[in-house]
Each structure stands twice: as C-alpha cells, then as structure tokens.
Image (tube, rainbow, N blue to C red):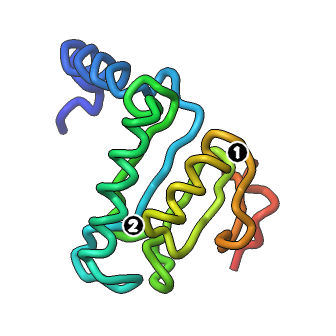
C-alpha cells in the first residue's frame, strides 16, 4: 500500500500554488455552477457567460488572486433549477439566477459589502458548526 502522505517537494509546491492564488488571504469563496457535463439548472452557454463575467469582474476590482476572493467553477451544485447557481462561503449563502447583472450585485453588495441579496437568496447555511445538531435518518 503506497504512503498516503505527499512527498515534501509536492507539499511545498502545493503550498506555493495555494499562496499564489490567495488561499492564505481569502475572506470569501464563490462557487459557481457552470460548464456542466449535463446542463440542468440552465443552458451551458449561459453558465459559461456568467463564469467569464465573474472572473473578469473580480480581476477588474482587484479581488481575485491575492485580493481576498477565491472563485471555483463547479460542475454541479445539485440545486438544478433556476441557475446559474452560486454559493458564497464562509456564510454559506446560496443564490439563483446568477447571470452577470446579478453577479455584479452579489460582488458589490455581498462579497464587498457583506450584505446578502435577499431577492436572490435560495438558502443560507454557514458550515462552521458541529454536526451534532444535524438530524440523522
């Protein structure tokens, strides 16, 4: 059975890459459902337009890379309706209808201003809580 620990050189390289994309300074992380293998929540082209906008706008505002905001393209966030769908952590705020106009508001009002957009929130659930209060089947 191979050793499950990464080689020191691999770990050092991973840490350099993580620092270069801003993992160590991140305050928010935006996951956007797009470029789906099997599009369900919205048309694939629409999701890719939203992704391109998110990347461009975060860069224009100096928020990407080491600016405090991480972004991840998610194949599917499992809320397969009314997309593009996004979730922002650490707050765990889920949004629907995340086309460029809505993403611009999310960036300005939530990511920068700290105020979720109530008119597009699907659900809010911060994950930094123990599992002991989650009902089990």
Which residue is identified by label 1? 128
In-front residue for pair 30/135: 30
Q: Would you call the spot at circle 2 few (<14 residues within 10 Å), some (14-19), or many (20 or more)?
A: many
Q: Please name the residue shown 70% across and 53% down the image.
A: 126
Q: What percent of the width, then of the height, locates residue 15?
A: 33, 19
As drawn, is 103 to the left or to the right of 123? left
Whether residue 4 is situated above or below residue 115 in the rendered picture: above
In-front residue for pair 122/53: 53
Q: Please name the residue shown 74% across and 67% down the image.
A: 118
As drawn, is 112 to the left or to the right of 12? right
Q: What percent of the width, then of the height, locates residue 76?
A: 37, 70
Q: Please name the residue shown 67% across and 69% down the image.
A: 121
Q: Would you call the spot at circle 1 few (<14 residues within 10 Å), some (14-19), or many (20 or more)?
A: few
Whether residue 50 is situated above or below residue 9 in the rendered picture: below
Which residue is identified by label 2? 33
Badge 1 marks a residue whose secondary structure is loop
Residue that sits furthest to the right in the current view: 133
Badge 2 marks a residue whose secondary structure is strand
In-front residue for pair 35/126: 35
Whether residue 101 is situated above or below residue 128 in the rendered picture: below
Q: Quadrant of the N terminus?
A: top left
As drawn, is 37 to the left or to the right of 108? left
């Amino acid at each position: 059975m191979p050793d499950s620990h990464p080689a020191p050189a691999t770990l050092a390289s991973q840490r350099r890459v993580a620092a270069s994309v801003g993992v160590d300074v991140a305050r928010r992380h935006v996951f956007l459902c797009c470029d789906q293998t099997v599009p369900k929540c919205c048309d694939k082209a629409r999701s890719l337009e939203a992704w391109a906008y998110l990347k461009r706008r975060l860069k224009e505002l100096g928020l990407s890379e080491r600016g405090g905001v991480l972004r991840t393209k998610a194949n599917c966030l499992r809320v397969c309706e009314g997309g593009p769908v996004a979730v922002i952590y650490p707050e765990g705020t889920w949004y629907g209808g995340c086309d460029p106009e809505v993403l611009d508001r999310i960036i300005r009002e939530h990511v920068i201003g700290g105020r979720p957009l109530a008119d597009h929130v699907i659900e809010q659930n911060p994950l930094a809580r123990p599992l002991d209060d989650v009902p089990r089947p």
